[in-house]
Image (cartoon, rainbow, N blue to C red):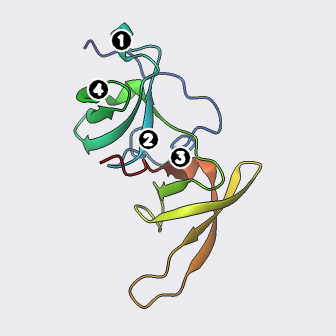
């Protein structure tokens, strides 16, 4: 693959709008992504997949439709937009890597419920949607 300029991400896309972070800091194992139209390989365009491994400048992505794992430059990936009821991972801030469920969405904000863990009670927190990425359901 030939590197190109980073692609455009529409406003409200998870992982964008994080001014103090690089454009790839949102990437994490287990989240759902879509391959951008701008990728040179036509057979990969708009494929949905799961990040299996984050590498320097690229990710190992399991393509669900093709049932195979490929390495894709990070600039060609965008996170899938989570919705109410989706399992999500927080990708920035104090709760980074925490997994919860979106209970409701209002505008560009979401109410996320975290299960009780290690002696802590169940928590409900508000996050901008840009701080959340959809987690892939167990496929195996």
Q: Of marks 4 and 3, which one's residue comes earlier in the chain? A: 3
Mark nearest the camera among 4 and 2 is 2
**Quick one: which residue is furthest to the bottom in this view?**
119
> Mark 3 and 1 residues: CB-CB less than 8 Å, in contact?
no
Q: Of marks 1 and 2, which one's residue comes earlier in the chain? A: 2
Mark nearest the camera among 3 and 1 is 1
State the residue position of label 4.
72
**Quick one: which residue is furthest to the front in this view?**
140
Rendered position, 109 above or below 16? below
State the residue position of label 2.
32
Rendered position, 66 above or below 55? above
Q: Residues within 10 Å of mark 2 (few under 14, many from 20)?
A: many
Q: Which residue sits at x=27%, y=32%?
A: 58
Mark nearest the camera among 3 and 2 is 2
For numbered disc 3, what is the local secondary structure? loop
Q: From the viewer's perspective, is 72 left or right of 14?
A: left
Q: Which residue sits at x=44%, y=36%?
A: 33
3D distance between C-alphas at marks 1 and 2: 18 Å
3D distance between C-alphas at marks 3 and 1: 31 Å
3D distance between C-alphas at marks 4 and 1: 13 Å
State the residue position of label 1.
43
> Mark 4 and 1 residues: CB-CB less than 8 Å, in contact?
no
- Where residue 136 appears, as percent x and y from the top left, is 42, 47
3D distance between C-alphas at marks 4 and 2: 14 Å
For numbered disc 2, what is the local secondary structure? strand
State the residue position of label 3.
18
For numbered disc 4, what is the local secondary structure? strand
3D distance between C-alphas at marks 4 and 3: 22 Å
Q: Which residue sits at x=38%, y=86%?
A: 118
Q: Residues within 10 Å of mark 4 (few under 14, many from 20)?
A: some
- Where residue 50 appears, as percent x and y from the top left, is 36, 40
């Amino acid at each position: 693959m030939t590197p190109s300029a980073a692609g455009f991400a529409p406003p409200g896309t998870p992982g964008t709008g994080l001014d103090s972070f690089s454009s790839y800091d949102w990437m994490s194992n287990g989240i759902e992504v879509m391959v951008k139209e701008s990728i040179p390989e036509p057979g990969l365009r708009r494929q949905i997949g799961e990040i299996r491994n984050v590498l320097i400048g690229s990710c190992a992505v399991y393509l669900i439709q093709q049932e195979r794992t490929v390495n894709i430059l990070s600039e060609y990936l965008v996170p899938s937009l989570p919705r109410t009821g989706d399992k999500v991972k927080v990708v920035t801030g104090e709760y980074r890597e925490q997994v919860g469920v979106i209970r409701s969405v209002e505008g560009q904000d979401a109410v996320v419920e975290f299960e009780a863990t290690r002696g802590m009670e169940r928590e409900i927190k508000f996050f901008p949607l840009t701080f959340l990425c959809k987690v892939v359901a167990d496929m195996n």
